[in-house]
Image (cartoon, rainbow, N blue to C red):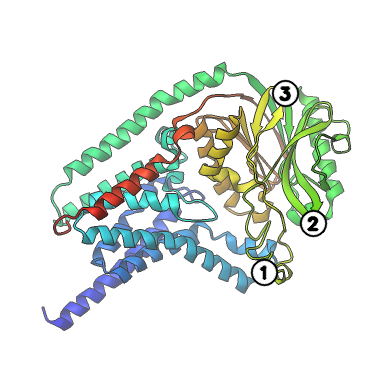
Amino acid sequence: MTDAAEDNANSTDRTRAYVWAVLGGVIYFLGWAGFGYWPLALVSLVPLWVALELSERPWRDALGVGWVYGIVMVAGGYHWLVPFFEVFSGYGSFASVGFWLAFSTFIGAQYGVYGLVYAWLRRRGWSVALVAIPPLIAAEWLYPKLFPVYLANSLNQLPLLVQTADLGGPLLVTAVAAMVNLAVFETWRWRRAVRGAPRAVWAIAILSVGLTVGYGMIRIPQVEAAMAAAPPFRLGVVQVNMGIFEKRGEAAEGHRRHLEQSRELEREDELDLIVWPESAYIRSLPRKLPMSGDAIRKDVRTPILFGGMSREYGEGRGRMFNTAFMMEADGIIRSMYDKTYLLMFGEYLPFGETFPVLYELSPNSGQFTPGNQVNALQLGEWRISTPVCYEDVLPTFTRAMVREANPHLLVNLTNDSWFGDSQEPWIHLVLAQFRAIEHRRYLVRSTNSGISAVIDPVGRIVARTGVLTRENLRYEVHMMQGQTVYTQFGDWPGWLSLAAIASMLIARRGPAK
């Protein structure tokens, strides 16, 4: 082949590689939470590996095809960020699209890094079968991102396939899904006579899925038995459906709705706790406990767990916190928890403290101070951990809460009205499901505008409200105890992946296969 012909062939392969990368990104976000066509998750990595092999692994192409794959994946899965930036942060359409693209580019770079590591290991002679999965697990685990993206989240509709999350969190579930992808890819290469029959890959994939399903078949009845034996606890959730600006401008109306719906719940039957969502009570409260909550509860006599704002003054300025309060049956508030992970652009602006002018450009963004503890709220003998807003989609953070307090129940207080009638409330619910499985606790979500829900310790959504609806939810949960393997040991699949990558970098094999 002449040099010109070889250059043309390389150019054609490079173009095909980027086309495959785009296709793979589309398949990934269609299979992921939100769109939810979960079978696509079992082949979503195949186009990425095709692209990386077509590029013949020069560094710029490995980075490029991986990055394109990631950008398309994130941009499609998080398309709802455009109206979020435009409506709720006060930006215009042009700036909102720019922020969305910047967000997609940054998060998508996770797969650019993956492509580089993949190419590096392949150039050292390691096979696709050994190289493909460890960098994927490490990237999901370590790459910094505002919202977590796990391939595991695509399988939320299949209880039998996600029960291993109590062993190794979402990373372990991702590993099994990736193994199925690898079997499909290696079969495709075999059919194209690129390699021999991948019998070992087939065997490992079949074994992985078989063990996962078998574990689910054994574990689900065990958890159900533990649920039945645990003490019951009667909960009511209030969802008043007020927009974020409506809540700010009509605080009295918001308070009236919460009280009115709480009275409705009390009239139906006795409850152990009523839950109001994040920022349900708009007027800021002092931070000195205990304090009376009679002005908040009025004639409601059931204990109330509610989200609000607390303020403290010092060093010549005030600080505002996004706080969860526990008001007991006697009307006294004795415990509270401050949100630790604040929502960028909604609750704070990056570098806003250094450059205050940024808040003038984004007038709807808050200026909250993060909390520094992960304590549980106490209600009699019960401990209740309360991740606020998107803290319940962060597995490492929720694990820290559970390890710190050993709670009987997880309650998430959220205000997803920031995102309007989009896919975000559904995505938020799906991502939160895994926290219930990981720690074998009921997870109750109380949201301002939907979706409020009860997720049982198997990860099933056993009760929920709609989106942008005003309604109540009541359910009898059970107060669980104990620690899972994941609670104790955390993201050990991530550590194993790093060890595998390190060993392949230290050693070297012959020509890549």
Q: Position of residue 331 (x, y in %)?
A: 84, 30
Residue with the mark numbered 3: 380
Which circle's residue, 3 or 1, is located before the other in the chain?
A: 1
Q: Amino acid at mark 3?
A: Gly
Which circle's residue, 2 or 3, is located before the other in the chain?
A: 2
The image quarter containing residue 464 is top right
| Closer to us: 252 or 435 | 435
Question: Callout 1: helix, strand or loop?
Answer: loop
Mark-to-mark CA distance, 2 and 3: 36 Å
The quarter of the rendered structure image containing the N terminus is: bottom left
Is disc 3 surrounded by few (<14), some (14 to 19) or many (20+) residues within 10 Å? few
Going 40% across and 36% down the picture, which residue do you hit? 161
The image quarter containing residue 401 is top right
Q: Looking at the picture, does residue 97 appear above or below residue 286?
A: below
Residue with the mark numbered 2: 315
Q: Position of residue 32 (x, y in %)?
A: 46, 50
Which marked residue is nearer to the observer: mark 1 or mark 2? 2
Is disc 1 surrounded by few (<14), some (14 to 19) or many (20+) residues within 10 Å? many
Task: Please identify the residue farthest to the left as the structure is shown.
Answer: 1
Which circle's residue, 1 or 2, is located before the other in the chain?
A: 1
Which marked residue is nearer to the observer: mark 2 or mark 3? 2
Q: Position of residue 395 (x, y in %)?
A: 51, 42
Going 67% across and 25% down the picture, which residue do you hit? 382
Question: Callout 3: helix, strand or loop?
Answer: loop
The quarter of the rendered structure image containing the C terminus is: bottom left
Residue with the mark numbered 1: 91
Q: Amino acid at mark 2?
A: Glu
In the rendered structure, the answer to whether residue 367 lies left or right of residue 422 reads right
Question: Callout 2: helix, strand or loop?
Answer: loop
